[in-house]
Image: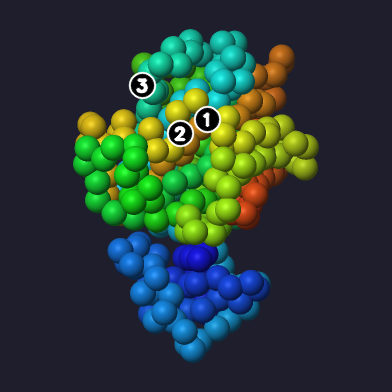
Amino acid sequence: MKWANLVVNGQARAGLVEGDMVCLSQAAQVKEILGDLRAAAKAVEGGPRVPLSEVGLRQPILRPGKILAIGLNYAAHAKESVSFIKPTPASVQKWFNKQTTAANGPFDPVHLPIVSEQLDYEAELVVIIGKTGRHVPAARAQELIAGYSCGCDVSVRDWQRASQTMIMGKGFDTHAPFGPFLVTPDEIDDFKALEVRGYVNGELRQSGHARDMVFSVADQIAHLTQAFTLEPGDVIFTGTPAGVGAGFDPPKWLKAGDRVRVEISGLGHIENEIIEETDTTVLG
């Protein structure tokens, strides 16, 4: 199944995507039906359908409770990262969080911050959690997964280096676009063969496969749940292949007008334009 958060005639709706059509749910968003997506699919049978081309697509989880991301989870990316950060030994999972306000739609603009010119991209496979889990062994980690999406871990490199935990450089508003769908695990024939590709202005910059991860998704979930509870609607960014802008000499930072596209075989694609952030003060 492929589920999406939609805007239909100005209203928020969850929808089951079938080819080029969408079956509309009574739910206003996918998070409301994460507990039983199969029952939700049955409930939309025979209901209203609209062309996918006529709806707006939002991120599958509008405001995740947690956005968690693992660093240096592809060996080739860890190697290139020597030029701009100090890599952590591969035996240790390196985690950081992106703020909930970073969550962004699959085709919405991404801000070039006022405070930095070192804006970078990281094409990633995203995991969406569907059940509550604590102390979950790797062998049962799959039970927590509602589905997968494409994502981009947008990074502000100078702010990333300035903070010991990377929290500042990874958490800017709009810097976690993902989608376009929540694709359930049963849709994927060979998870390890999933290819993650990242493009900037049509140029292929990144390419890697799920099998290239240093720590598998199951290992990631097992590790995280040793520390805290994962809950329905939490989102995990699972690492990026080599080819990020900071890895070039000189670096290839994103500029206003650039378009970043992330494709993952079987999951679809997202594409976001980089726009200049405004300096408008917001209070209350």
Residue lying farthest to the right in this orientation? 203
Q: Nearer the viewer, residue 95 or 283?
A: 95
Give the quadrant of residue 245: top right
Three-letter code, disc 3: Thr
Three-letter code, disc 1: Met
Q: Position of residue 89 (x, y in %)?
A: 44, 12
Q: Nearer the viewer, residue 30 or 6?
A: 30
Q: Nearer the viewer, mark 2 or mark 3?
A: 2
Specify few, some or many for label 2: CA neighbours under 10 Å numbering under 14, 14-19, or 20 or more. Answer: some
What residue sits 22% from the left and 37% below the top? 135
The answer to whether 204 appears left or right of 188 in the picture is right
What residue sits 54% from the left and 59% below the top? 187
Give the quadrant of residue 172: top left
Q: CA distance from mark 2 to mark 3?
A: 22 Å
Three-letter code, disc 2: Ser
Answer above or below: position of 260 versus 284.
above
Residue picked out by circle 2: 216
What residue sits 48% from the left and 79% below the top? 24
Specify few, some or many for label 1: CA neighbours under 10 Å numbering under 14, 14-19, or 20 or more. Answer: some
Residue at disc 2, secondary structure: loop
Q: Say the numbered circle drawn on residue 213.
A: 1
Callout 2–callout 3 Cβ contact below 8 Å: no
Residue at disc 1, secondary structure: loop
What residue sits 23% from the left and 31% below the top? 227
The answer to whether 239 appears left or right of 266 in the picture is left
